[in-house]
Image: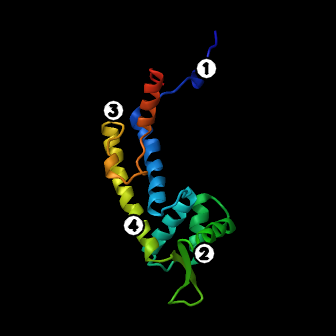
């Protein structure tokens, strides 16, 4: 008889935990792809744009390049050089480095233009709706498509739906 030590036994989580742990992240990434009309939109790019957007607000667009590099490096636990490479990858796509009008020798990162700003605003609006959808999913885990109509095509995700489909296909709960 194969005895599995208690610390290695199969662990089951309920629908609420699965929804909390997976659905928001999945839908957030899909929201970025939708807003930026991109097939892929890596998590690192999402977070860098979030950092620059935050700094554009909190520093009125005047945060220095070094402060942005330090924030990106700290967030990802990477070197300043690596942070610089990641920012430069997004330069000319979504970001621009501009000279500070008040102090001509200081440069800072900012969103490239109003088009990028509108895309960021669209992501923010979708994230609000996603939070509402998550609440609906948790309240009604037996309805795998609940809230789907609130989001654009391709943004909705529900891990419960995937499990229910597998259960249906196999004829038993997996």
Q: Is mark 2 on a helix, strand or loop?
A: helix
Distance between the alpha carbons at the discs numbered 4 and 2? 25 Å
Which label sits on residue 138? none
- In the image, is residue 125 above or below residue 118? above
Q: Is mark 3 on a helix, strand or loop?
A: loop
- In the image, is residue 65 above or below residue 104? above
Q: Position of residue 126 (x, y in %)?
A: 38, 58
Q: What residue would you read off at disc 4? A: 121
Q: Where is residue 147 in the image (x, y as percent from the top left)?
A: 32, 46
Residue in the picture at 41% in, 70% down = 118
Q: What residue would you read off at disc 1? A: 5
Q: Is 151 in front, or is 102?
A: 151
Q: What residue would you read off at disc 2? A: 66
Which label sits on residue 142? 3
Distance between the alpha carbons at the discs numbered 4 and 3? 32 Å
Q: Is 8 in front, or is 49?
A: 49
Q: Residues within 10 Å of mark 4 (few under 14, many from 20)?
A: some
Distance between the alpha carbons at the discs numbered 1 and 2? 51 Å
Which comes sooner in the sequence, label 4 or label 2? 2
């Amino acid at each position: 008889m194969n005895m599995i030590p208690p610390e290695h036994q199969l662990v089951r989580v309920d629908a609420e935990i699965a929804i909390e742990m997976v659905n928001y992240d999945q839908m957030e990434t899909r929201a970025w792809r939708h807003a930026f009309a991109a097939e892929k939109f890596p998590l690192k790019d999402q977070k860098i744009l979030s950092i620059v957007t935050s700094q554009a607000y909190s520093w009125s667009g005047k945060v220095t390049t070094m402060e942005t590099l330090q924030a990106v490096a700290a967030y990802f636990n990477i070197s300043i050089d690596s942070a610089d490479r990641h920012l430069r990858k997004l330069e000319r796509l979504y970001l621009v480095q501009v000279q500070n009008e008040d102090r001509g020798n200081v440069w800072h990162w900012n969103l490239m233009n109003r088009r990028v700003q509108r895309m960021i605003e669209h992501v923010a609006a979708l994230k609000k709706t996603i939070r509402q959808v998550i609440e609906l999913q948790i309240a009604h885990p037996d309805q795998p498509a609940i809230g789907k109509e609130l989001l654009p095509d391709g943004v909705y995700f529900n891990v419960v739906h995937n499990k229910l489909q597998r259960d249906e296909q196999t004829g038993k709960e997996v």
